[in-house]
Image (cartoon, rainbow, N blue to C red):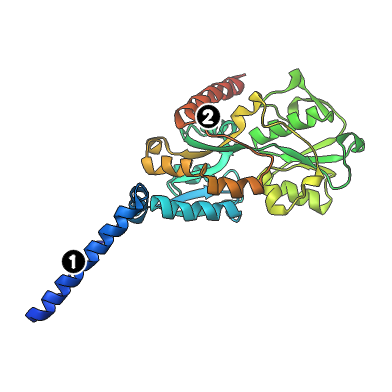
Amino acid sequence: MSSPAPALPDKPKRRGPLIAAVAAAVVVLIAVVAIVLATRGDDTTTTAAADGGSGETVKIGVADKSLDYWKTYVDLAQSQLGVTVELVNFSDYSLPNPALAEGEVDLNQFQHIQYLANYNVTADDDIQPIGATAIYPLPLYSTTVDDPAALPQGAKVAIPNDAINEARGLLVLQSAGLLTLAGGGNAFSSVEDVESSKVEVTPIDASQTANALQSGSVAAAIVNVNYATSAGLPEDDVIAQDDPSQASAAPYVNIFAARKEDAGNETYLELAKLFQDPAVQEVFTQAYPNAVVEAPDAAQLQADLAEVEDDARAAAGA
């Protein structure tokens, strides 16, 4: 909310000739502005909206604030929407959703639908997706071998310990031939479902997987893309990953999320859509060349979330 305008000072008394001169100057200025606007055509609507803007400040919780595409995004939010975006960085995946629920941020952008569904079901919350960014592959990194088959028997492999990324990480390890999951595994598998394994699976906080790899305490690690980028892990160290282009990867589309009562907020919807602007995408795809960019609308994302939440409730009741 903007602060009240300060009281205007009393108008000083002016002599007639000075008033006439000022009036003439104003007429000339209005004429010049009219000519400029007339020559700009359809561009004036966008520019006028941007200049006026909503005057809002919107806090968005993220996990990778330092990446270049966010600067482009923040600049565009100001110039195109007249919105000041304040990025709030979280180093732990468990924090952004409670922060959103408590009103500490207005939106967050760090998670995929599968993660949000699990959060909503376990926390009895109803946070909703309002826009999408991309599907990222989930990579297995190693600094010592070039192929998963080359990992020695009993080698330690770190995976994220949050429920959803743990399951997805286990599925990557299974597809790499390193372990076997009961029933072939699913989006809610845990280490308890490992039937046989060549390696020793070590679940740790997602933010620590890159550190564990770089310190040499594990031979390989499943590292979420944003943490891998922050840690400077090279693409050459990826020895396996899932395929984000497959239909089965749809629940892993990353999203902008809002509280349910704000899911129809026009400013928030415009901010979510802004991520798909070509200027943002140009920088984003440089940072994540293997990501598959997605742009389903809010209604589709919310329908997908409801479906995955049903699966999460069924898994929890099993």
x and y, in percent, of residue 118 in the image: 57, 31
Q: Which of the pair 244/110 is nearer the observer?
A: 244
Q: Is residue 136 left or right of residue 40?
A: right
> In this picture, is 93 found above or below 116?
below
- Badge 1 density bin: few <14, some 14–19, many ≥20, Cα 10 Å: few
Which of the two discs, 1 and 2, sits closer to the camera? 1
Q: Earlier in the sequence, mark 1 or mark 2?
A: 1
Element marked by disc 1: helix
Residue at 59 percent across and 31 percent down: it is: 114
Classify the position of the C terminus by image quarter: top right
Q: Which residue is mark 1?
A: 27
Classify the position of the N terminus by image quarter: bottom left
- Amino acid residing under circle 2: Val
- Residue 10 can be seen in this image: no
- Residue 238 can be seen in this image: yes
Numbered badge on residue 299: none
Q: Quadrant of residue 32?
A: bottom left
Element marked by disc 2: helix
Q: Which of the pair 124/298 is nearer the observer?
A: 298
Residue at 79 percent across and 27 percent down: it is: 175
Q: Quadrant of residue 179?
A: top right
Q: Is residue 204 left or right of residue 254?
A: right
Q: Is residue 120 left or right of residue 169?
A: left
* Residue occupying the far left of the picture: 16
- Amino acid residing under circle 1: Val
How far apart, in angstroms, are the residues tagged by discs 1 and 2? Answer: 63 Å
Q: Which residue is mark 2?
A: 121
> In this picture, is 317 found above or below 123?
above
x and y, in percent, of residue 58 in the image: 42, 51
> In this picture, is 296 found above or below 108?
above
Q: Is residue 197 left or right of residue 161?
A: right
- Badge 2 density bin: few <14, some 14–19, many ≥20, Cα 10 Å: some
